[in-house]
Amino acid sequence: MIILKNATYIDWKSLDFSKTNILVHQGINNKIEFISDSELENYKATTCIDCDGKLVTKSFGVGHHHVYSALARGMGTPKKNPGNFVEILEYIWWTLDKCLDEEMIRYSALTTAIACAKAGSTFVIDHHASPFHIENSMEIIAAAFDEVGVSHLLCYEITDRDGLDKAQQGLDETENYLKSNQGLVGLHASFTVGNETLKKAINLSNKNNSGLHIHVAEDKSDQDHCLRTYGKRVVNRIKDAGGLESSKTILGHCLHLSEEERNLIKESPVWVVQNMESNLNNKVGYFSGEGLGKNLMLGTDGMHSDMLQSAKFAFFAGQHTDIIGYDTSYERFRNVHRYLKDNNFEGDGDNNLVVLDYASPTPLTKDNFYGHFLFGFNSAMVTDVISNGKLILKNRIVQTVNENKILSESHAVAKKLWKEMQK
């Protein structure tokens, strides 16, 4: 057990503040208790962290990540300068993911998990691709995340773009993983997934009581291909195939949607995950939650692992194109917890906490919390993180693995990857 004494606790749902001592029980989906000063004497042998002057609240979660892109930072220019979104995929990301081997996947996962922990996230929903190392790839990622102490909901990106044999390998990897792990059935996007693969993926999802995790209309080219090839728009195609029926299903991006498609999503139980920074970086457009309903959450799309930063970008960029406000930005930031709880996924219980060293020049109260959330909080303030009741970050130092050693080793692995990409 862990005690956080002298904490200013902020209930993440009600935003109520309380000065208290928190007893944190270890284990999946376990609880926290608020105890008095006199009761502290009963827990002398328990790990104790003095949180005087600090804030304690529920830790964060990433609604859409890409572990496979972790070693891309600082890499050289592609062989051809991309002229559009499809060429960005072809000459950068599809070039990178084809080069990934077991070692690269492991270090991508380790460094991602470390980055998430240090930014306050204890749960990650990831969408992975490694076409020439599909088998056991999800187990490699899961093991690395478990080593750091970050919970996860993984999927493999099934696609026809490298041939139907690779698509089947993706289906097989997913089926094997779901036998003993919580996870989703991943698909790249409509324009790289044929009808037969889409049907198999949905059948696999239904068989395992899972959901899909698919990129939807991230770029207009996805819609153009769908209309040209199937005579319908992307969301209509997914619906007609039976892919909008599970509350576990996640639709990534959802930029270029018609009013009818937005209504189909709103009337279904599925979730939409927004990735504003990635959209800006790829110049594919701006997200708007208008007409999509309440099941909206935030992701990073592999750009980084800092959800506080993602929330700020969603809010500021959304002032021109979205219906996002102070309260709804925080709601989207926290909705990952609702997604996980409502769908009975494990690893995001009350005993997942973050400690923030936030010294504000102005008062912080329940009534003005959103202003501090958007204009004050940042990941540099994260000092301690508890995941499933286990202390994984203490005084900004990762407790579960040797961060410096892993980062040093990942440099060599990254150089190896970059060299392979130039062949």
Image (cartoon, grey):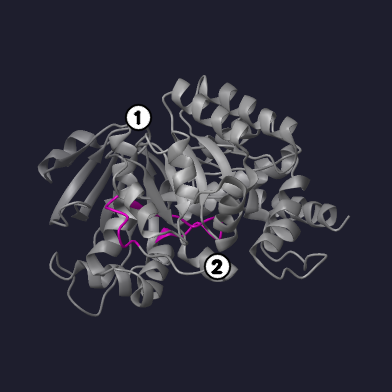
Residue 313 or residue 371, whichever sits in front: 313
Q: Which callout, 2 or 1, points at the residue further toward the start of the chain?
A: 1
- Amino acid residing under circle 2: Val
> Residue 86, labelled with which disc?
none
Q: Position of residue 215 (x, y in %)?
A: 52, 50
Of helix, strand and loop, which mostly describes the magenta segment? loop
Residue 110: tell me if it is visible. Answer: no
Q: Residues within 10 Å of mark 2 (few under 14, many from 20)?
A: some
Would you say 104 lies left or right of 155 here? right
Residue occupying the point 20% across, 67% down: 369
Nearer the observer, disc 2 or disc 1? Answer: 2
* Quadrant of residue 75 within the rendered picture: bottom right
Using the numbered discs, state the Cα–Cα distance from disc 2 to disc 1 in whole angstroms: 42 Å
The answer to whether residue 390 is magenta is no
* Quadrant of residue 24 within the rendered picture: top left
The part of the chain drawn in magenta is 289-307
Q: Residues within 10 Å of mark 1 (few under 14, many from 20)?
A: some
Outermost residue on the right side: it is 423
Residue 254 or residue 143, whichever sits in front: 254
Q: Secondary structure at mark 2?
A: loop
Would you say 174 lies left or right of 275 here? right
Residue occupying the point 72% across, 33% down: 164
Q: Position of residue 256 (x, y in %)?
A: 47, 61
**Which residue position is annotated with label 2?**
284
**Which residue position is annotated with label 1?**
27
- Amino acid residing under circle 1: Gly
Residue 51 or residue 136, whichever sits in front: 136
